[in-house]
Amino acid sequence: MKVFHEKEALRSWRAALRSAGQTLALVPTMGALHRGHLSLIARAQQEADAVLVSIYVNPTQFNRANDLANYPRDPEGDRQLLEASGCDALFEPISLYRPGHASWVEVPSLAGTLCGRTRPGHFRGVATVVTKLFQIAQPEVALFGAKDLQQALLLTQMAADLDMPVRVLTAPTLREADGLAMSSRNRRLTPAQRLAAASIPRALAGAEATLRGGTTTAGTITDAVTRRLVDAGARIDYVSLVRPEDLLEIPPESPATPGLVLAIAAFFGATRLIDNVLLGSSGLDEALAEDP
Ligand code: AMP
């Protein structure tokens, strides 16, 4: 596996690939890699001749200095996982911003809801750093995870709106045995918080089961999910039922129907976790045993 710290060296490698007629898939990450990331790499390998993974904890997408400082980092472990994954190259820049950086990419229509409400500037940072990565690596394909659904949608919109010559693909969420979505942030949980965090997939599974059981409203679903998370000790950021195409929130009195997305952000201690399911097709209610 090639390792690049400088964008100039990466560009040369990329140019050589192109000369050899090979396509490139990019998997942007912030490191502290887990099997969710590896599933994106495996998908990327099906989509292009070569796979590049980037690891960069992008400061401009953190709205709290504390969160940035405490973000999990594991360069040694990451290197080993990537070598074993068969990915072709790693781009691990020290910084991607030059002094005086002053240009930003924004998708306001998709950044104002869900995570955008409590993380101002987050999606501007994400869209900007991904644009920079696209410019540097010029991949034909880029892979993002459905766990971060708002991010995946927003980047898909951005690439289409701005005629970026890249196919943006979204891959399914990989979960632990108890249903918790794999996340670098799970490393920050204490054993008790890790147990409590399993209330997220259980609450999502409960919503699936309720919907399967018959007619219900958005408010009934979000109230039940909220109660379940609070009972487990979570501090809620949001529990929202939204339309998958534009993340528009469904009013509480409106019917909850299959095909809508149920999205959650909740704190367990200081750790903020997010998850979502496409209602009616997650299979979570069948995969997880209900509470006794
Ligand atoms: P991160 O390193 O958390 O910024 O994530 C890098 C990429 O991996 C993003 O596109 C995420 O959506 C994706 N990802 C994170 N967790 C998972 C997961 N459990 N399953 C699939 N993809 C994931």
Image (tube, rainbow, N blue to C red):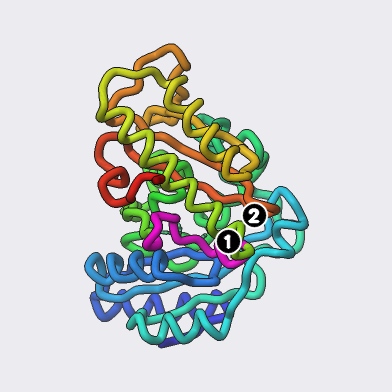
- Between 201 and 241, the one lying in front of the other is 201
Q: Secondary structure at mark 1?
A: helix
The residue that appears at 62% across and 61% down in the rendered structure is 58
Q: Is 27 above or below relative to 87?
A: above
The quadrant of the rendered image in which ligand 1 is seen is bottom left
- Magenta stretch encompasses residue 178: yes
Which label belongs to residue 185?
1
Amino acid at pointer 2 = Thr
For disc 2, the neighbor class at 10 Å (few under 14, some 14 to 19, many from 20) is some
Task: Please tell me which residue lies in front, 37 or 287.
Answer: 287
The residue labelled by disc 2 is 271
Nearest the camera: 55 or 161? 55
Percent from the top left, x then y, of residue 52?
40, 73
The residue shown at (35%, 64%) is: 40
First reached walking from the N terminus: tag 1 or tag 2: 1
What residue sits 41% from the left and 67% below the top?
37
Does 232 appear above or below 172? above
Q: Are marks 1 and 2 in contact (CB under 8 Å)?
A: yes
Q: Main secondary structure of the magenta part?
A: loop
What residue span does the magenta drawing correspond to? Answer: 176-189
**Left or right of 195: which side holds 254?**
left
Task: Give the structural element (helix, strand or loop) at label 2.
Answer: strand
